[in-house]
Image: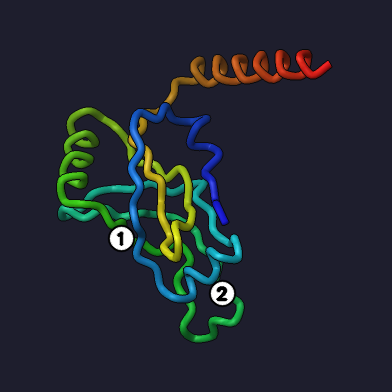
Amino acid sequence: MEINNRKAKYDYQIFETFETGIVLTGTEIKSIRLGKANLKDSYATIKNDEALLINMHISPYEQGNIFNHEETRTRKLLLHKKEILKLRDKVKLEGYTLIPIKLYFSGNKAKILLGLCKGKISYAKREAIKKRDIERDIKSRMKR
């Protein structure tokens, strides 16, 4: 099961990626295994030398009763201290943004692919669309 943030590649230019663990409760992991999660409006930040994922939506687990989780709570990301300090400096000094690109399972563990990004300007988005359309057109002509 893989959940992608499709808007991330469209809205941001990705410079570097980091694989991080994420702290989840039991009902959250069950909902993710059912594919009921969304990374669309989420982002990561660093506070008190901890990486936090904000605004990631995980739907409540249907059989979760009173032990269900809050849908968009702040979740802790698991990174090495050196990585956290490096990311903190890049975000503060160089104006980067931390965006989750993909949520997937590695063995039994849920992982987040976190991208170090900068926002694209509108004309860069149009260029990306034009380039993708040209590549798609070339591929379709080659198949004929």
- Compared to residue 22, the image places residue 124 above or below, namely above
- Residue displayed at 45% across by 70% down: 70
Q: Amino acid at mark 1?
A: Lys
Q: Amino acid at mark 2?
A: Tyr
Figure disc tally? 2
> Any mark on residue 61, and which?
2
- Residue displayed at 29% across by 32% down: 96
Task: Name the residue carrying label 1.
Answer: 76
- Compared to residue 16, the image places residue 1 above or below, namely below
- Compared to residue 84, the image places residue 142 above or below, namely above
**Percent from the top left, x then y, of residue 33?**
55, 65
In the image, taking residue 63 as reference, residue 18 lies left or right, namely left
Q: CA distance from mark 2 to mark 1?
A: 20 Å
**Percent from the top left, x then y, of residue 1?**
57, 56
Q: Nearer the viewer, residue 64 or 143?
A: 143
SS at mark 1 in the image: strand
Badge 2 density bin: few <14, some 14–19, many ≥20, Cα 10 Å: many
SS at mark 2 in the image: loop
